[in-house]
Image (tube, coloured by chain):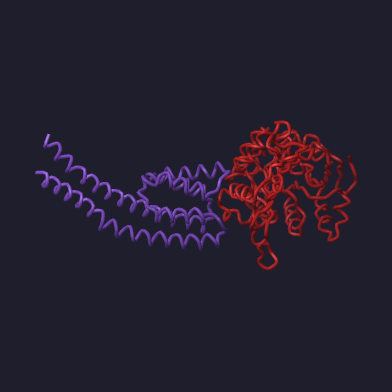
Amino acid sequence: MKIILLSVLFILPVAVGFNLSKKTERCYKNLRYLSMCLEKIHIQITQYLMPLGDIFYELSKEEIKPMDEIFLNIYRGIENGGQTFKNMFLNEFEQKKETLGFASDEMDLIKNIGDLMGSSNVAGQEKYLTGLIKSSEKLLAYREEQYKTKASSYKKLGILAGAFLVIVFL
Amino acid sequence: MKDVLNDIKENILIHFPPSLSKCVNNTSPDVLSNLNEIRLRANKAVTANGGSEYTLAQSGFLTNVTEPVIASAEDIKTIFYSAVRQSPYAFGEEIKNGYITLKGGHRVGLCGRAVLTGQEIATIKNISSLNIRISKEILSAASEVMPLITKEGRILNTLIISAPSCGKTTVLRDIVRRLSDGIGCLAHNIAVADERGEIAACANGIAQNDVGSRTDIFDAVGKAQGIMSLIRSMSPMVIATDEVGTYEDAKALRAASLCGVKMLCTAHAYDIEDMLTDKDAIKKEICSLFERIVVLKNAKRPGEIKAVYNANYERIL
């Protein structure tokens, strides 16, 4: 009984630490992929005038989870018509917010993308997308820093807290 | 033949916000399938035309409506963005020209605030009115006209003229299909310069309308430019194009006729006098290139012939 209790006391903080670490990692990796997609979208829009539906369909085929599902749903939303891009883009990311590990900063970026992407002519898109790429790069640099420093710290802290609790109860 | 009701639902109403499409869907199938156009203006009642004038109510398009459904500016915006697949930047030329072609060949006319670059319209912003013209593919539209524009199974240079909405494009499309498939004549290789996308209604390069098995389509290209390019690239027996009327069109058509390519065109005019008495003589110049000029009636059924003239402008029907 004592061993079980000690095991639980050890595992709980370790699990919390690993979970926080995973979330930081997920957030960083998904944001990095989103930034990369933004650059691709920028080229597809400004150089090839490719419609957003086709761009998101192509992106969905890259099968990077869970973004591929989001992109496929956005593509379907565009093709099915009758709603604004802003709403469908934000809704899709809002639904997958937890899986993506996105926090409010990332969701603000998503909201801005939804507001501006596809809303204007090529010159406008060039300007807006350049701005959005800069914002995402800035946020990415911050998340990268967090990932490098905090991700491993969360794990260590979890293990230490677990060990501390075990020692205290012993 | 297209299922008009399904076509309207799948290719037009899909772009409407749910509040409006629900009301339109309540329209009786008879009325809905006979509609020629739907007009939406910001903060005004939604109207439609199809023989009679209709106004949209909660129970569909009706002739006498006390409580009409009002289209908001947001509704217009939603339809516009949906029609351009949320990508107005990809439809720059079409928006500049004031219309977008939907799947199925339906055309959405745009009106709003013009943004000018010098004297030219660069784009249209704050779209406040939409006129959705419903394209109808009628596979028998040219049955009456075919014997009059062919000789020994070969097409003669033919110009179809009529007032707007009398079915010029519908008739042209059916002639193209018949010539291409060799229905009632020899089969011809045809090239279509489809500037407004109304003849073949291409979506992603694939013709949505039946334009025959030997037809090449050059989509969204200026007529004059398209004709010259098609002669060089596709060596067609016949070139078909819609709504000719400028000096450049006349020049390109002359070049085509010098190459021995037969021409099949339409033009806006009420009658042949309208073409021949044109002030700057461009329409007269265009007429001189054709062996047959077909004038259509302003009738309920598209393709009803009012008169046919030969190359000397003598009435032969």
Residue A6: x and y, percent? 14, 40
Residue A71: x and y, percent? 45, 46
Between residues B111 and B312, which one lies in front from this camera angle? B111
Q: Is residue A13 left or right of residue B242?
A: left
Residue furthest out toward the front: A169
How many numbered discs sit on the rendered protein? 0
Q: Classify the position of the N terminus of chain A by image quarter.
A: top left
Q: In this view, does A89 lie to the left or right of A146?
A: right
Q: Can residue B218 be seen in this view?
A: no
Identified at 31% across, 58% down, the residue is A144
B174, above or below A119, in the image: above
Colour-to-chain, purple: A
Residue furthest out toward the top: B29
Where on the picture, by quarter, is residue B5?
A: top right
Between residues A6 and B277, which one lies in front from this camera angle? A6
Rendering colour (chain B) = red
Residue B64: x and y, percent? 78, 37
Identified at 39% across, 61% down, the residue is A137
Residue B99: x and y, percent? 67, 51
Q: Classify the position of the C terminus of chain A by image quarter.
A: top left
Between residues B180 and B50, which one lies in front from this camera angle? B50
Where on the picture, by quarter, is residue A108?
A: bottom left
Identified at 30% across, 52% down, the residue is A24
Q: Can residue A107 be seen in this view?
A: yes
